[in-house]
Amino acid sequence: MTSKRRTLTLINALVLAAGLGAGAAVLAAQPWIGVPSATAAQKLVVAGGSLSPWQAVVVKVRLPSGETSTQSATANATGALAAEITTSAAGTYRVDVFDTAGQRLGGGDFVVAR
């Protein structure tokens, strides 16, 4: 193998390794939000992860009546979120979680059966 070919092979390997490393970092940094699909309780916990440590979020809940309730929550030191929602009536609720810049991080619907 010539010196030029070895250099190109080494450069290609380094570029590939850098690309794979950057891709893994991007995938690992994506926040997620989990909303249980149903509950019979008066309280429900919206979970999240891969947030920044102590990241503030806004949790918006559309009630079965159509009204919207808004509350603040904060991730813990590891970037995990546990936002407690109190339900007031049976029906379908919609939860959306936003960062403080207004970007939606995730959410979902859940049904309260009583």
Image (tube, rainbow, N blue to C red):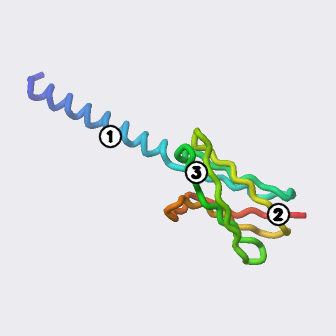
Q: Residues within 10 Å of mark 3 (few under 14, many from 20)?
A: some
Q: Camera-side residue: 109 or 83?
A: 83
Q: Secondary structure at mark 2?
A: strand
In front of the other: label 2 or label 1? 2
What residue would you read off at disc 1? 19
Task: Give the mark nearest the N terminus, 1 or 3.
Answer: 1
- Looking at the rendered structure, the kind of residue marked 3 is Trp
Image coordinates of residue 43 in percent, x first then y, are 81, 56
- Looking at the rendered structure, the kind of residue marked 1 is Gly
Number of marks present in the image shown:
3
Numbered mark located on residue 32 in the image: 3
Which image quadrant: the N terminus?
A: top left
The reply to whether dot 2 and dot 1 touch (C-beta < 8 Å) is no
Which residue sits at x=59%, y=46%? 49
Image coordinates of residue 74 in percent, x first then y, are 62, 51
Q: Camera-side residue: 52 or 26?
A: 52
Give the left or right position of residue 9, taking residue 24 as reference: left
In front of the other: label 1 or label 3? 3
